[in-house]
Image (tube, rainbow, N blue to C red):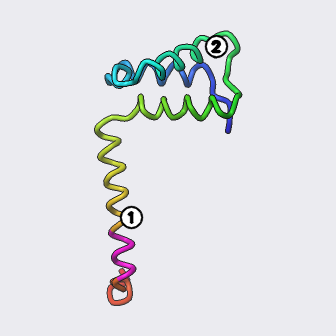
């Protein structure tokens, strides 16, 4: 994993506050996030791979909005439809 900078962590925190997802996190994740935010402010970046993956998952939760959930569900439905069409040989009789 790549290191995560203070700016990335701060941007995730701000967007989570704006869209209300910060309040949906449990206390342990909030504490971990605040601790890494403070540490990254002092050191500049987080390089520990395990901590980096944990923080990136929390950032993903903070940035999730209704729009992104709908987008992800649409992509999953499209993949499912493509698989069904391939199984039923739709592309053989209708290639375009």
Q: Are marks 2 and 1 in contact (CB under 8 Å)?
A: no
Write the residue at 38% across / 35% down.
Answer: 64
Write the residue at 52% across / 19% down.
Answer: 33
Q: Position of residue 57 (x, y in %)?
A: 51, 34
Q: Residues within 10 Å of mark 1 (few under 14, many from 20)?
A: few
Task: Work out whether residue 44 or residue 57 is closer to the camera in this orientation and state it.
Answer: 57
Distance CA(mark 2)–CA(mark 1):
41 Å
Under circle 1, the secondary element is helix
Q: Quadrant of residue 65?
A: top left
Does the magenta portion include 19? Answer: no
Quarter of the image that includes the N terminus: top right
Magenta region, residue range: 81-87
Which label sits on residue 58? none
Q: In terms of secondary structure, what is the magenta stretch mainly?
A: helix
Which residue is the site of mark 1? 79
Tell me: residue 44, above or below residue 58. above
Does the magenta portion include 85? Answer: yes
Write the residue at 70% across / 29% down.
Answer: 48
Left or right: 63 as drawn, with respect to 51: left
Which residue is the site of mark 2? 39
Tell me: residue 5, above or below residue 57. above
Q: Position of residue 50 (x, y in %)?
A: 65, 33
> Going by the picture, which residue comes out furthest to the bottom?
93
Quarter of the image that includes the C terminus: bottom left
Q: Quadrant of residue 55?
A: top right
Tell me: residue 4, above or below residue 23. below
Under circle 2, the secondary element is helix
Q: Position of residue 94 (x, y in %)?
A: 32, 85
């Amino acid at each position: 994993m790549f290191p995560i900078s203070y700016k990335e962590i701060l941007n995730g925190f701000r967007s989570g506050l704006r869209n209300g997802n910060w309040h949906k996190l449990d206390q342990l994740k909030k504490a971990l996030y605040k601790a890494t935010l403070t540490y990254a402010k002092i050191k500049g970046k987080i390089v520990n791979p395990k901590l980096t993956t944990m923080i990136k998952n929390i950032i993903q939760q903070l940035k999730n909005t209704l729009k992104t959930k709908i987008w992800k569900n649409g992509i999953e439905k499209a993949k499912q439809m493509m698989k069904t069409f391939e199984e039923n040989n739709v592309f053989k009789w209708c290639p375009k």
